[in-house]
Image (cartoon, rainbow, N blue to C red):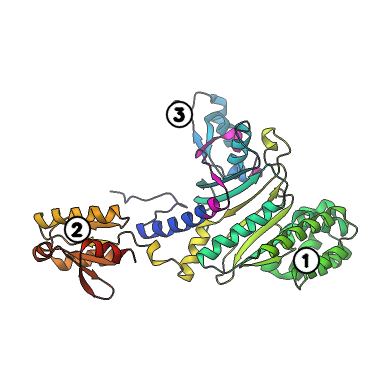
Amino acid sequence: MQKPSIPKGTRDFSPEEMAKRNYIFNTIKETFLLYGFSQIETPALENLSTLMGKYGDEGDKLLFKVLNSGDFLKNATDEQLLERNCPRLTNALCEKGLRYDLTVPFARYVVQHRNELQFPFKRYQIQPVWRADRPQKGRYREFYQCDADVVGSDSLLNEVELISLIDTVFKKFGVRIVIKLNNRKILSGIAEVIGAPDKIIDITVAIDKIDKIGIENVNAELAEKGISQEAIETLRPLLTMSGTNSEKLDTLRSLLASSEIGLKGIEELEFVIAHVGAIGIHSTLELDVSLARGLNYYTGSILEVKACDVQIGSITGGGRYDNLTGVFGMDGVSGVGISFGADRIFDVLNTLNLYPADAITTTKVMFCNFGDSESTHCLSLIKQLRESGISAEIYPDSAKMKKQISFADTKNIPYVAIVGESEIAEGKIALKHLATGVQQKLTIDELIAELKK
């Protein structure tokens, strides 16, 4: 008989892993609510007409398409079947697909429900997405995204609030981070000043790799793309800028003096940096001109979060887009959003061992089972504990004491309660702390107070 398995690029999560994941989701969710965001959910399945053409040719190939119900061949001609042209066949066989991200479904949601929404609309969404990607370390076919967006407002205060929100989340996690900030208009200004506005994509794709391959290799790649040596030399001081954020802004101002769009980007950066400085954050906010992110998508501020103490890619990212809903025929809706990489945050917290003990403890106390009359008495005590918000359970069988305590230990239950004939007669419960071996006799009220400490 074949051993059961799961599809490549998907994962099972054990109870302990789920406790850790829920700690991450709950922390992010609490912070979204703290900042005034409302939750929505969209279906796992979207019409392919909603998804296709929104992620470029590569993205279209990575969409999981779902066969129509029933006789899915009814719309396909014999000619199409014999031709074996996958894209054409897909159109005939599939009307729906699994969502690839949360942003396009959100754009569809805003357009579909525009008459019911109050703008600016602040939404958050924590749901799984699917990509038919080649599975590899850190890249899965099913994974969660945790997004927050504000649409229908051009105000840069939204960027300031999102940076503060990111800072709050990672402070709660106890992770030291650097929030890297740039602006798409600066990148357009750079391309303009070096005389290659049509090469904006090539320039940003190259400079986005500066951390990985170094400036000389970036310059070689730029030359390969047909950027002149003079332009590459003009670019060098921009890529090697150091100093404080205000010193970098001064350098940018002199280098981009002739670019109107570049100066607008500087003005926007100044506003965000100044206001974040005024409220004060625990993290480091760093202006990084080499930061590009999915360039075709963003139009203003762009940001990325790096963990200081773990070698891992970006753990949160986002930015400003001017026309999220344009693809669905509703123009001029500006928005700004961020997405937390829950799976990478999971890896960071595991590496640094930052989960609080109570986040991964499911049951606080387990009652040992000494037989029918004792277990009946214990159930009434357990009911009182649960009504006080304390998680408790009873071992279901009256097995040997050693076996019961070993079970509690394996399940990371910190306390066992022992209630035999003598404890029932005294109206007490013997509470044993498994880590220390300390045991004390308590009334039910004392027990509740002890476990709530």
| Res. 226 image quadrant | bottom right
From the image, tell me which residue sits under label 1.
220
- Residue in front for this viewpoint, 28 or 134: 28
Could you tell me residue 341's position as x and y percent? 55, 56
In the picture shown, does residue 8 fall above or below 406? above
Magenta-drawn segment? 31-58
Q: Residues within 10 Å of mark 3 (few under 14, many from 20)?
A: few
Helix, strand or loop at label 1? It is helix
Q: Are marks 1 and 3 in contact (CB under 8 Å)?
A: no
- Residue in front for this viewpoint, 294 or 287: 287
Q: Nearer the viewer, mark 2 or mark 3?
A: 2
Query: Is tag 2's residue or tag 3's residue first in the polypeptide sequence?
Result: 3
Query: Is tag 1's residue or tag 2's residue first in the polypeptide sequence?
Result: 1
Q: Amino acid at mark 3?
A: Ser
From the image, tell me which residue sits under label 2.
395
Res. 123 mark: none
Query: Is tag 1's residue or tag 3's residue first in the polypeptide sequence?
Result: 3
Q: Is residue 83 left or right of residue 362?
A: right
Question: How far apart are the alpha carbons under marks 1 and 3?
Answer: 53 Å
Q: Is residue 395 left or right of residue 308?
A: left
| Res. 450 image quadrant | bottom left
- Residue in front for this viewpoint, 149 or 213: 149
Could you tell me residue 346's position as x and y percent? 48, 61
Q: Amino acid at mark 2?
A: Tyr
Q: Residues within 10 Å of mark 2 (few under 14, many from 20)?
A: some
